[in-house]
Image (tube, grey):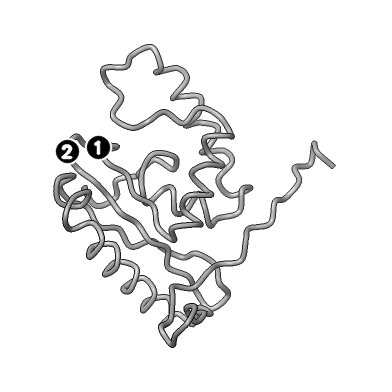
Amino acid sequence: MRLGYVLPLLTSATGQVFLTYLDESETMAVRQDEIAAAKRDSSDETTALAPRVTNTKDIQKIIETVRKQGYAMTINSINSSFAAVAAPVFDYSGRIVATMTVLGSDKQLAGPRKKPTIDALMAAAHRLSERLGAPGRKAKGGGDVTPPVAPKPTRTKSAAGR
């Protein structure tokens, strides 16, 4: 990755974390653009690395998975033979302000190093969130602190929908 490279919202691990924790009104235009592009490009299967996200059902599945896991993972999505794992960083208000992302070989990140990498990434994102004042919560059955959980984004109505 080069500095300044803009990652896709729907098919990159970093984008999927922002998709999950930002308000829908903040991501709607990008969602629509990327869905339209995926539908346009659907005839050229040879250039597609990432799974196609072409409807709101696909988006909802991504959001549910990221919320359940607390992180997003993509394999062979942006570059062949690469994987990415991204975790959210929250501020004092519980709002996402950044992601921390680990990139590497799909054989390593999706293989034997998957769990230790995800554990280290989640711990680092949690520590940074704590330093930014994010509210945390205790894990079940012990004193371990789990990564903060941001409040569920509220859905705003568009002017046309009022």
Counting labels gives 2
Q: Which residue is mark 1?
A: 76
**Residue most toward the front?**
141
Secondary-structure class at tag 2: loop
Neighbourhood count class around disc 2 (C-alpha, 10 Å): few under 14, some 14–19, many 20 upward: some
> Percent position (x, y) of residue 44?
33, 14
Residue 101: quadrant of the picture: bottom left
For the residue pair 57 and 99, the one nearer the viewer reads as: 57
Q: What's under tag 1, amino acid-wise?
A: Asn
Q: What's under tag 2, amino acid-wise?
A: Ser
Q: Earlier in the sequence, mark 2 or mark 1?
A: 1
> Percent position (x, y) of residue 138?
49, 82
> Percent position (x, y) of residue 98?
41, 63
68 to 162, vertically: above or below: below
Neighbourhood count class around disc 1 (C-alpha, 10 Å): few under 14, some 14–19, many 20 upward: some
Q: Give the alpha-carbon distance from disc 2 to disc 1, as whole Å.
A: 5 Å
139 to 99, vertically: above or below: below
Mark 2 vs 1: CB contact within 8 A: yes
The structure residue drawn at horizontal position 41% and vertical position 17%, both measured from the top left corner, is 42
Compared across the picture, whether 131 is left or right of 56 comes to left
Q: Which residue is mark 2?
A: 81
> Percent position (x, y) of residue 94?
55, 72
